Image: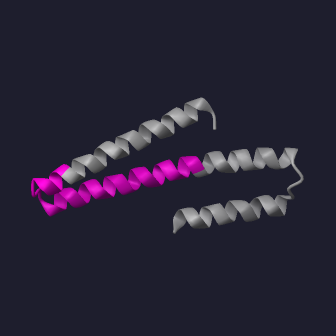
Amino acid sequence: MINDEKSNILKRLRRIEGQLKGIQKMIERDACCVDVLIQIAAVKAAINKTGTLIFENHANECLTSSRESNKTQEDVVKELMQVLTSFIK
């Protein structure tokens, strides 16, 4: 993973961590359920975006490394599909 991409992903994860801590505080303060659910939706969206970035990075690396290895195009596609299937569950 390129350092800029890694730094971007780590920033996103730290932001998500902060959002989760904020949700915990909201629960402790008996905040309105609607407000909590809105924050949970925001965390889910942020996690999905982060996962997508990681998947894109993996796909690019997988395709690049397949050119340098003995992997067939079919093997690469199969691996990518397995990773994608795990990600979207």
The answer to whether residue 49 is left or right of residue 68 is left
The answer to whether residue 85 is left or right of residue 16 is right
- Identify the residue at image location x=10%, y=53%: 29
User: Looking at the picture, how far across and down is residue 7, in whole percent?
Assistant: 51, 33
- Identify the residue at image location x=38%, y=40%: 14
| Quarter in which the N terminus is drawn | top right
Give the mark count: 0
- Identify the residue at image location x=71%, y=45%: 61
> Quarter-wise, where is residue 15 in the image?
top left
User: Looking at the picture, how far across and down is residue 81, in whole percent?
Assistant: 68, 64
* Residue found farthest to the right: 70
Q: Which residue range is magenta in the image?
A: 25-54
> Quarter-wise, where is residue 74 in the image?
bottom right
Q: Nearer the viewer, residue 53 or 70?
A: 70
**Vertical comparison of 49 with 12: above or below:** below
- Identify the residue at image location x=11%, y=56%: 31
> Quarter-wise, where is residue 36 in the image?
bottom left
* Residue found farthest to the left: 30
Indicate how the structure is coloured in the image: one colour
Residue 35 magenta: yes
The answer to whether residue 15 is left or right of residue 33 is right
User: Looking at the picture, how far across and down is residue 28, in whole percent?
Assistant: 13, 55
Residue 21 magenta: no
- Provide the major secondary structure of the magenta segment: helix
The answer to whether residue 20 is left or right of residue 27 is right
User: Looking at the picture, how far across and down is residue 60, in whole percent?
Assistant: 70, 46
